[in-house]
Image (tube, rainbow, N blue to C red):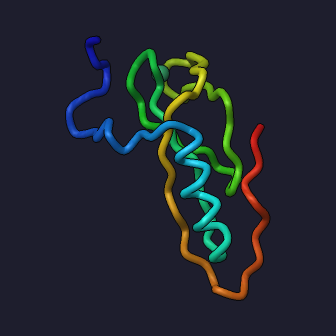
Amino acid sequence: MESMIPDGELPYEDLPLAQLAEMANKLIEKGHLVFMKFTCEKCGARLTFEEPNTFYKEGSCDQCGHVTEIKHGGFMVAFVHRNFRSNYMRVK
Ligand SMILES: [Zn+2]
């Protein structure tokens, strides 16, 4: 299968959602904020959701407007105060 991910992106950062959720929940347990990322299946843009600790089943692209059904994704972690109590990941 031909990849539409442009050079410079690292496709292996994208993991199956089940694995991603497990990793994310461990980080959230420690009080970190996790922002889900995904790659637009049409144009290859790398997108990050603004709402923390929330995983989405689909996302629309800022660049081309295409709605991607998210099967693989990554996340960005924001390190917060360790006494900060965040909720478990939600799925939208
Ligand atoms: Zn796109």
Question: Image point 47% across, 25% down: which residue?
Answer: 40
Q: Residue at x 52, y 43 (%)?
A: 37
Q: Nearer the viewer, residue 5 or 16?
A: 16
Determine whether, in the image, residue 4 is placed left or right of residue 42: left
Residue 39, given in percent of the width and then of the height, sits at 45, 31
Q: Answer with left or right where residue 90 lies relative to residue 74.
A: right
Instruction: Say which quarter of the image contains residue 27.
Output: bottom right
Q: Which of these two is toward me, 43 or 11?
A: 11
- Which of these two is toward me, 86 or 47? 86
Q: Residue at x 58, y 28 (%)?
A: 70
The image shows residue 65, relative to residue 16, as above or below, that is above
Residue farthest toward the left in the current orientation of the protein: 7
**If the image is split into quadrants, where does the N terminus sit?**
top left
Quarter of the view holding residue 53: bottom right
Q: Quadrant of the C terminus?
A: top right
Q: Is residue 87 above or below residue 30?
A: above
Residue 10 in the image: state x and y as whole percent.
28, 41
Residue 3 at what x, y percent from top left? 28, 19
Residue at 67 percent across and 43 percent down: it is 55
| 51 sits left or right of 17 in the view | right
List x then y, in percent, for residue 6.
26, 28
